[in-house]
Amino acid sequence: MPVRYALVGTGSRASMYLGALAGAHRADGELVAIGDTNPGRVAVHTRRLEAAGLAAPESFDPADLHETVRRLGIDRVIVTTPDRFHADYVVAALRAGADAVVEKPLTTDEDGVRRIAEAVEATGREVLVTFNYRYAPRNSALKRAISGGEIGDVTSVHFEWVLDTAHGADYFRRWHRQKENSGGLLVHKSSHHFDLVNWWISGVPTRVFASGALRFYGAENLGDRGPRPPRGTSEQGRADEFSLDLAANEDYRELYLENEGFDGYRRDQDVFDAGITIEDNLALVVDYAVNRASSPGVATMSYALNAHSPWEGYVVNVNGTKGRAELTVVERGAVIPDGAVDPSMNPELVAANETRPVSEKLVVQRHFEAAREVEIPVGEGGHGGGDALLLRDVFQGPTADPLGRTASWRDGVRSVVVGIAGNRSLETGQAVRTSDLALGPAESTLSALARA
Ligand SMILES: NC(=O)c1ccc[n+]([C@@H]2O[C@H](COP(=O)([O-])OP(=O)(O)OC[C@H]3O[C@@H](n4cnc5c(N)ncnc54)[C@H](O)[C@@H]3O)[C@@H](O)[C@H]2O)c1
């Protein structure tokens, strides 16, 4: 019997899962029902599924998820709603007798972690968090380098992630820009990065100090970039660098512009609006308990996130007792206005609509030896081949993986607690111990992980 799926939250990200169930993973599961508070977006995805040759799934009201799971005998629920609702739907799925597959972040706050942990404890059901970054070949290569012992025991990590004025700005146009929806970038975006660090160094975060603010987007930072052009217009005959033209992108037009009448959700709000409550510049110091083969240890991370950089990518430097590993990734070299192709992009990759990075370099250097560049295998498709590997794990079940890439809800917890503690640190100006967070049954899970 094929696994019976329901999906809740039929926006952009849902396309990856729906496309998999209509394509490469058609034989691995049956899409039985889809639900969203916006019936227009459900209709768009239903048309696309039918065009791909699938029978139309039943459309359900997300408020009835529990009843839908019971009535239709759903085995697994995929949750791709805005972050603030993840906990509601994961809990509803588990308590109705299904397993859950949830996008990152697991949830946005302590209450969400506690409710998910209680539901897992009460039902014994599974929650899979889809941390696709682990599967990107460059990130897997760093994991391999660290776990192979070449740089010894990890003592500290320096990690900087920069989002450019196209991708970074996008978090300031829609629901993410309200902290209650997304937990801010420390939860919404950085949970990817914090998961990578936990996984790379086998660490459990124990203490977080954060500092940051909104310093570029938002009405208070408009400076000489105003006045802002009205929606859908061009400024002096050319595109505005910070405006998004939904009509110009077929997917955005169909999914969002044409369905605004149902719920008023505007995908292209101005990034210099008043009332944005998330930060765009963030710096953290995080302490970790590290599980080492020899003996338990401690490591420290310095982390920075910037959301208005001229280029996009990241730099991770890992220091160990025997040397150091450095991973440098440029995902986009420049944002060039007026739709011109980024001159630093490889034209073949642009033609193939590839999301492979412009450049990536992993260097490992042991003390008293020359540096060695580590070859990074090239994969096909989104996130350097990572998405295809992730989808295989999601729909066919994890294979024996020496890198341990499949993430459980416990991994979701230990990544999201950094952002949750970071948010409290931003509010109080104090360092916050993750053991001081009110996480219900997840507290013992965190401390067990720290001791393991
Ligand atoms: N792993 C990744 O690389 C990655 C990339 C993009 C998005 N995501 C995650 O996927 C999720 C969805 O992001 P998106 O970009 O598709 O957002 P989106 O806004 O495009 O889609 C969200 C959908 O949820 C619907 N929705 C809103 N409130 C709802 C509610 N209460 N109940 C049910 N449905 C509701 C909206 O109508 C919309 O169709 C987020 O959690 C995000 O973090 C992950």
Image: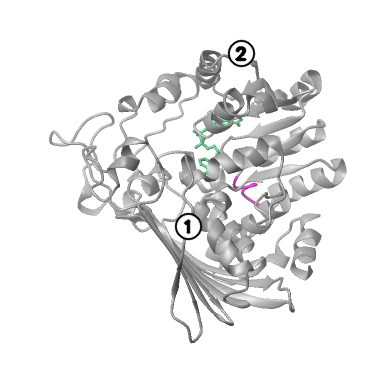
Q: Residue 451's x, y, as percent?
A: 78, 70
Residue ID for mark 1? 376
Q: Residue 116's x, y, as percent?
A: 75, 45
Q: Can you tell me whether the CB of the residue at mark 2 lies under 8 Å from the nearest atom of ligand 1?
A: no
Rendered residue at 58%/24% (across/down): 37
Q: Which residues are magenta?
A: 104-109
201, above or below 336, in the image: below
Rendered residue at 37%/24% (across/down): 250
Ligand 1 in which quarter:
top right
Q: Residue 19's x, y, as percent?
A: 55, 27
**What amino acid is found at the position of numbered circle 2 in the picture?**
Ala
Q: Which mark is residue 56?
A: 2
Q: Residue furthest bottom?
A: 368
Q: Nearer the viewer, residue 311 or 402?
A: 402
Q: Quadrant of the N terminus?
A: top right
Q: Which mark is residue 86?
A: none
Q: Can you tell me whether the CB of the residue at mark 1 lies under 8 Å from the nearest atom of ligand 1?
A: no
Rendered residue at 45%/26% (across/down): 264
